[in-house]
Image: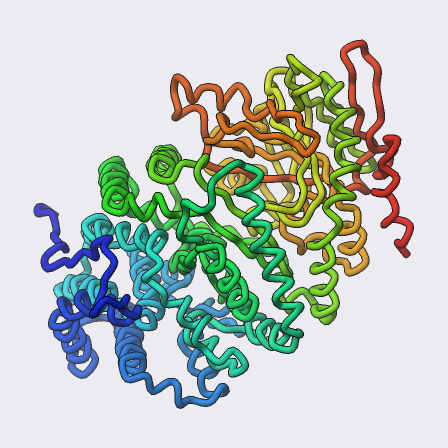
Amino acid sequence: MSEKLNFRSHIFILSGQKYKKRGKKLRYRELLKEENDSVLERYTLAVERITFFLNSETSLQEPYKDYFVKTALFLQEMDRLKRHIDTDDLKDYSFEALQTYNRSLYQDILSEDGAYEESYANPAYAVKRLGAELGPLLSFLYVEIRGDIIYAVEQRLFNMTINAELFIQVLCLFEEGIPDAKEIKEILYYFISDYSDHTVDYRTREMLDPSLDFATDIIMNSDLTDLRYLFRYGDYITDNEIRLADFLNRMPEDEIEAMAYTYTHGYEEGFRIAGIDLTKKKNVNIRYAIGQERMIRAAIVQFRKMGLTPIIYRAPIIGGNRRAGYSGTSPNKQYDYDHRQDYTIYLDKAYVERRTAILRNSYESRKELAKEYAGPAVIEVFGENPFEPRNKEENLKLSEKQQKLSVQMTSESAKIVNEYIPHKDYSFTIIAYPIPEIGEQFEEIFKEIIKVNTLDNEAYKKVQQILINELDQAVSVRVLGKGENRTDMLVMMHDLENPEKETNFENCTADVNIPVGEVFTSPKLTGTKGVLNVSEVYLNELKFKNILLTFENGKIIDYTCDNFETEEENRAYIKENVLFNRETLPIGEFAIGTNTTAYVMANAYDIVYKLPILIVEKMGPHFAVGDTCYSHSEENRLYNPDGKEIVAKENECSLLRKTDESKAYFNCHTDITIPYDEIASIVSIHEDGTEVSIIENGRFVLEGCDMLNEPFCSEK
């Protein structure tokens, strides 16, 4: 097109101020009223235009007519949903009626009944029906519009308005004839770019401003014994959410309080151990899974006693990490995977620069809120069947140039966030619980996980100190796999200038990282080399078969797996989901997990490959690729319980922060654990060549570590 499209007229940007009325904070619904009123006329006109299209003859020819009619009908349904929310009449629906309605909203992207195979949300179907050039673009448009389910529930009329206007603009072009794909792509590009001053700004506000209390209101003010509350979120509600909420409702109050305390006390301990003054903070970001509300309500009460107000925001509506906020079970992980690189439509240098500038302005306007941010308190869930994606040639993919831009955008965004919320000034905690999908023994497993999460810290602290005392004498550590496991890693340790007062390894108990059970270090990269191999592992919510990484001087030089038929697909899978489109990554962490109780429990219930990395990393030696555990906070002085200062907090990459920060940090950290049963040996190698065994044939053999082998005795 010869003229740049402009979508930015009449935009109303929410400021970072705290809205008040008669001295009292407004409820969430009132917070958006001014913005909604400002676009109501535009929205009404857009709905009228869509209704007119559906009720009149059209010049559109098939297959495009089918696409636009179905998308218009969806938009019409979203308007009905909006009116349901405006009038609050859904509160009178029965549980069964709400469940049926909820399913109808997500019906065409569900995989279980094959609906997704004939949905325009499926790029393969869109290409089949609409062509190789227009199909992916129109699929992207439809997926953007599907975000209206959440926008309607959250009463974000601005987003519904611009989506409707975008649909109408594209529709008008098709009514004039079949447009060129470049013209459609340009419309989509400027839609995303021009409105990013609203979307990026709003997302920043969600992350910092506790007055956006949509979810907090559900948690604190719903009757949690009436499971109809689950449908207030707008997410797809499955048996996972329903059965989880029901199970927690049946637990005694003292057990709920104890679970919440493990979580909130771990958070508080993280500040104490890191030497950060929690009293200077006001807000805590709570991340959880829908269905856990009873525990979260108890946690909010406990956090408030610490002086912390909850900030609770949704995981990204379209694409992104589902753990970056609260969420329910994905309606279709293949759908998520198919659209993971849709941003190829608009990712260019100009967009990166624009988005970065908006992000900085957003944080600058809320710098006081940023100072009050204490950090995330995360509850992960596990138990879903490991997802093995299917690659589709119809999916949009980043070019090599865009892969580099993606890395640049991530790095620049992280730098801005760290500028306003320095890593050294906040803490976090992470804990995990199962969901019903884990199997028929869900309730038993849940109770076993509670035990794992509350193991005796003091006992582990003592035995882990024995491990550290030996490892601090090592110049290197050798890790060998057994059987078909090809692991053969030589890991170099940092030199200790004052061994009486310094240590390389952190004695990790249950505070920020629950459950208890590991000693870890940031190894020296120079000289670290070998092969890391795991038969089966679940990384970043994706299953990897027989992953194999080769290292030289602590950096990945080669990689493969057995997920797909071709080597090209296997390498691309790892590059995207482990290296995050980089050419290489360093080892940021080497650790030895000590939680044999968790390992034996996992084997007893046959759930090893359904556990989250949070627990799995405690169940054997592991390596993390990416940043160190002390990223951006290397200057903080940390001490183990024995009083020794932890000095191995960085490596040859993170040291570059002093000269070129862009080369120091990678904004990722992926743990890869080798199960005990795949370990032949872990040996500490001293400077004089003495070798001391830590583990042999999957069992701890270092003197004083017998406690760690006791759970194995109970194995059947």
**Residue closest to the eye, 255 or 61:** 255
Residue at image position (44%, 50%) is: 393
Q: Residue 79, percent across and down?
A: 26, 77
Q: How is the image coloured?
A: rainbow
When the figure is inspected, residue 224 is found, relative to residue 272, above or below; the finding is: below
Please state, as top left, top right, bottom left or bottom right, where the C terminus lies in the image. bottom right
Residue at image position (76%, 36%) is: 464
Identify the image quadrant of residue 63.
Answer: bottom left
When the figure is inspected, residue 138 is found, relative to residue 686, above or below; the finding is: below
Residue 105 in the figure: left or right of residue 472: left
Residue 705 in sight here: yes
Residue at image position (66%, 74%) is: 251
Residue at image position (39%, 24%) is: 661
Q: Residue 560, percent across and down?
A: 61, 36
**Residue closest to the eye, 585 or 595:** 595
Q: Residue 658, percent across and down?
A: 41, 19
Residue 167 in sight here: no
Identify the image quadrant of residue 669.
Answer: top right
How many marks do you count on the picture?
0
When the figure is inspected, residue 605 is found, relative to residue 59, above or below; the finding is: above
**Residue closest to the eye, 146 or 235:** 235
**Residue closest to the eye, 561 or 606:** 606
Q: Residue 81, percent across and down?
A: 31, 79
